[in-house]
Amino acid sequence: MPEEKNNQGRPADENKKSGKTKNPSFFKKLADAFLGKLGEFKGEFKKIVWPSRETLLKETLTVIVICVIFGVYIALLDGGLSFALSAFSGFAQNFGG
């Protein structure tokens, strides 16, 4: 009776004896790692304490008001400096020569 051979030319029993198993592919490992992290993400996402609607609206309004106040301050500062520079420039032209 002829001996069964595997695709590497060795007897079929030899691979079983050596205990070699096929390693999972790179993409299988990558998918397993991604799904593991996705599960961790889902668990952490459940721990988030979301603000109430009232708190969210109050804090949003506070941020908008502060942005408007700083915007007005910067615009006034810019306008004042521009006016002062143009006045000084005009003064220098009148008396400079």
Image (spheres, grey):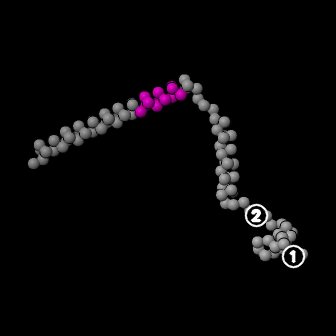
Q: SS for tag 2?
A: loop
Residue type for callout 1: Pro
Instruction: Tell me, yes or no, whether the highlighted magenta stretch contains residue 91.
Output: no
Image quadrant of residue 66?
top left
Give the percent coordinates (x, y) of residue 75: 32, 35
Nearer to the camera, 2 or 15: 2
Q: Residue furthest top?
A: 54
| Residue 18 in sight here | no
Asked if residue 4 is positioned above or below residue 23 in the image, the reply reads below
Residue range highlighted in magenta: 56-67
Asked if residue 81 is positioned above or below residue 14 in the image, the reply reads above
Residue indicated by mark 1 = 2
Q: SS for tag 1?
A: loop
Residue indicated by mark 2 = 22
Give the dominant element type of the magenta stretch: helix, strand or loop. helix
Instruction: Tell me, yes or no, whether the highlighted magenta stretch contains residue 66.
Output: yes
